[in-house]
Image (tube, coloured by chain):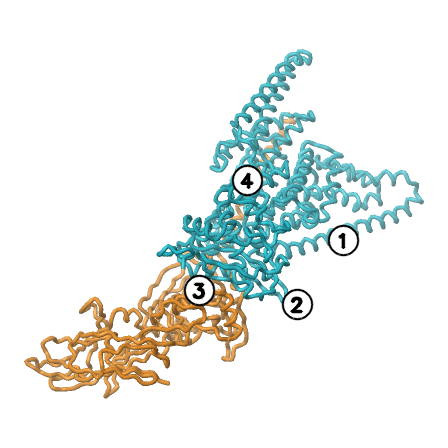
Chain colours: A cyan, B orange
Amino acid sequence: MVTSATIYKILDNIGLHVNIRDVCVFLAPFFSSLTAISAYLLTTEVSDSISGLLAAAFMGVAPGYISRSVAGSYDNEGIAIFLLVFTFYLWLKSARTGSMLYSCITALFYFYMVSAWGGYVFIINMIPLHVFTLLLMGRYSNNLYVSYSTFYVIGTLASMQIPFVGFQPTFTSEHMAALGTFGLIQIVAFTQYLNMMTTRKHLRTLIRPFLTLIVLAMVLLLSYLVATKKIAPWAGRFYSLWDTEYAKKYVPIIASVSEHQPTAWAQFFMDLNILIWLTPVGLYFVMKDLSDSRVFLVLYAILGSYFAGVMVRLMLTLTPIVCVLSGIGLGEFFRTYLNFSALDNPQLSKTTKSSNDSSNPQAKGKAKAKPTPEKTDANNSSFEIGNEFSKMVQWFTVFCITLLIGLFQIHCTWVTSNAYSSPSVVLASYDSKGNKLIIDDFREAYNWLTHNTPEESKVMSWWDYGYQLAGLANRTTLVDNNTWNNTHIATMAKIFASSEENAYEIVNDLDIDYILVIYGGLLGYSGDDINKFLWMIRIGQGVYPNDLKEEKFFNSQGRYSIGNDASPAMRDSVMHKLTYYRVADFMGQNGLDRARGQRLPTEVTLNYFDEVFTSENWMVRLYKPKPRDILGRVPPK
Amino acid sequence: MMFILKSIFLLFSVFISNLTNAELVNSNIIRDINLKKTFPTDTTRIVLFYNSGEQTAPITEYIFSINSTAHKNLMDISASEIKTGNELLIRKLETQSSISDVDYSVHLNSPLRPENKLSIKIIATFLRHFEPQPKSIKINEDAFYRCLPSSRILSYSKSPSPVSADDNTLTFGPYSRIDQLDTAPISVHFFMEETPSIITDFARSISISHFSGSISLDDYTELLNDGPKLIDYNRVDYYKATIQRSLKNTMNGFNVHVPLDARNIYYTDIIGNVSTSHVSRSEVSDSLLLQLKPRFPVMSGWKFSFNVGYTSSLSNYLKYNPSTKKYSFKAYPYSDPIEMGIKNYKLQITLPEGAYDIEYNPSFGADSVEITTEKGYLGFFGSKKIVFSKKNTSPSEIGPVYVMYKYSNLQLLLKPIIVSMFLFGIYLAFSMLGSYIALVDSVKTTKDVSKSKK
């Protein structure tokens, strides 16, 4: 947000008076272009520029990232992924060169990332993990020491300036790994220093007890602090990364979000397509010739794919590394198969290869050497035929791979246009003749609220619609998409699940003017409130265990039914009544709820609430609680 | 069918003369109030008689007052002599005789001498605003209004008598010997089929660009269905009425004409594109018909606002006068001559940057004209913006506005020059930086070389 405001002000000052809205719309695409550039830099850092270009190209089209970078998706993730990739690039560069300047810049970008996205925790765990692994592998170097120490100190101090983070780096578990690694690297550095000073034997006797003591003391201290809750336990969202069932049991609000569900295999294919099998290829080449920076890629790939498997949303953090590794894999491939000079003149190819190697210390080009030995072994006559044949094979393979990449491009375009380009607030459907119909019920109702309700009215809805109501209808909401406080969301759930009489009391206590429910039964839109109702009850149950019982909402056959055979609690609930009020009058007594394929309930009465608006396709229904009866009649007349 | 109330309709106005001592008598007054027109009119015909006492000075001024509640909706007022048909000058007085009235002074062209008679006519036009009675209705219920007319009159006040009614006309009076400033309220309660819609706010912004040779136009409209408040909303009833084509009191769409060469037509509201619009060739020559549907049916008592805009060629509106060396821009204040009242009207014309010597000529009596400076796209000095505003008007009342200004074609080059200078500056800075770095490097290497030589 600060970013878009800054861009807006700069543009405004140089005389380009663009609308702030346009800045917001084009922010994500602009940053995604920067992401592609940083993917190039990152890949070039560990491999060569051919792989870098391929990685950048993949980054530009991979649907996994496009989901957050299409024009109009104004989200923190849009800039956060750029910062993630760029910070990693800077980190690798600083770790390789041991330059303090680069680690300072890394820390600055880390600071920017902290201010932009809660996912900064990934960086602050990923980099220490990299350092830790290098230490375990015995790859300690002074460069690493300089860059990590600089990065950690500046980065942590800077991140503490963000109000949201504050003193968290000193006491929460998420940040402990970084602190521990920082301590460890000091010890290791000290050991190295002693190593230089004394003989090996002396060192051993000196270090062993000392080191054991320190480690033991630290472990004890840590466990004591965790046990006494001095160090905050992990937040629910992070727990669910380890134990996928955790959220469902303890924090239903996290589990209820579709983005927090484990990723389906189809989703992987949809978002990554051929990159899925190009990644292991890249990983193979990376492992084959391991360097400090390459270790980082391997770690990132492992963690990234694990996290992406746990939560759909984290597909986003996996995408960059997949693109980088695919770039490396494909780069190696092209280097091998497009190297015709090796066939024509083996002698020449050797020289070019060696010159290549000397020009780029990172690219070792071992794979490139593969075709050469066969050729030098062959005698002259068979060389001619073999040469022709190999050329054809080479051309054919290159053709096939290029075709695949072309198909991948088509797939990406298709996914982007079909899955990620439509705004979720406007739906599109096609009639039997193939004409596009636009279903604009949400905006219809939000606009109605803007124009035809008093400005200070308070609208109650399920939390999914909170930001939309605030942004599009300009009305006060009781709950919105900020889910940090579970209790008021649970209170909404309680209202929806209570009987009309009880709900009316709470509604009046909370001073609610309008109630909004989403009904998809007429269109067959399955994301409506009745389908979310079970989650609402589960969330409500956590706070009001005495008032809400999930089992009560299943009918005698144990089914989640909405029709005439629904359970009494279901039929009495405000949610059911508000949703199905007058629907049967409209659809007929034998009407079908198209979202659930069940018969509609025929007798729905409503005594405490008045219908004030229903949108064209009945998707959004607005109700107003009746004013309190001055004579105290129940229900109010 | 004409509906005319012939009466001394005291709810609206009273008459006084300015000379308290002189015996100026309204010897005969006939008021026709036509409520059936889109803009109700109140025509008062007065026969003045100067019954001279001690005073002999001729009378040149007659004061006419309008109830301040009614005055809020006053669109236009004019006075004329009946015999000659000559227009009389009428102006609003700054000082009011009472809080409840707004006074107008009619200047008599031929002063009224003692013992003489003069017949004058005063026509006041109002925006339609009737008070709904009952205040709220259900879907498709008939809407009734107080104080106004049609063939179905529910009730009317029976006093002061005599009152007689036939079909469409209510006649109050005649009454004799009425004191000045004497009032007696009367009211009519009637049915009206038409939806009493009104545009509460209308703002047209036109910006002229000589560079692209086009104008861009944006109309902001805020619509109000001025009927009774809707209660007991029921989508099923609405649906039934729609398929039976018997839906009442609801605005479901409207048409706007735009020029044939209009490009980039849009129809949006505060939350983005309204997906229900259609463009087709209009029957009116040289124009396109834009069929607009609001996001939701604007039912009784509801509101909706939207923006319509497009780009059109400048040459259709701009003429150059070589003798005065001035450009003359003709702006149409409204797209269609529709019969609907506008409560607050605003026309903003943004001239190109560098326009000077500005003159304007609104053919409608704008309440206020303002010239402000505004920074435009890549603007450095700011462009002049002229804002005309008027209260209580209608599209049929406001004629075109002419704006004349001088503009040098050299101004066209200003923006490209500044932009290219800016880019060139960046290029220069970078290339200088590059050569500086190269210089430093070469110095370093020569140093290294000299070192190694040593």
Residue receiving disc 4: A118
State how far apart marks 4 and 3 are (Cα): 47 Å
Which of the two discs, 1 and 4, sits closer to the camera? 4
**Which amino acid type is marked by label 4?**
Gly
Residue B278, image x and y in percent?
54, 70
Total of numbered circles in the picture?
Answer: 4
Left or right of A409 on screen, residue B49: left
Which of the two discs, 4 and 3, sits closer to the camera? 3
State how far apart marks 1 and 4 are (Cα): 39 Å
* Residue at the image position 43 percent from the left and 50 percent from the top: A505
State how far apart marks 2 and 3 are (Cα): 36 Å
Q: Is residue A361 above or below residue B266?
A: above
Residue density around tag 3, few if under 14, some if 14–19, many if 20 or more, within 10 Å: few
**Chain to which mark 3 belongs:** B
**Chain to which mark 4 belongs:** A
Q: Which mark is residue A432?
A: 2
Q: Are marks 3 and 1 on the same chain?
A: no
Residue A567, image x and y in percent?
58, 52
Residue receiving disc 1: A403
Residue A584, image x and y in percent?
56, 63
Disc 4 + disc 3, Cβ < 8 Å = no
**Which amino acid type is marked by label 2?**
Ser
Residue A351, image x and y in percent?
79, 38
State how far apart marks 2 and 1 are (Cα): 35 Å
* Residue at the image position 60 percent from the left and 58 percent from the top: A525
> Label 2's element?
loop
Disc 4 + disc 2, Cβ < 8 Å = no
Residue receiving disc 3: B232
Which of the two discs, 2 and 3, sits closer to the camera? 3
**Chain to which mark 2 belongs:** A
**Which amino acid type is marked by label 1?**
Leu
Q: Toward the viewer: B410 or B326?
A: B326
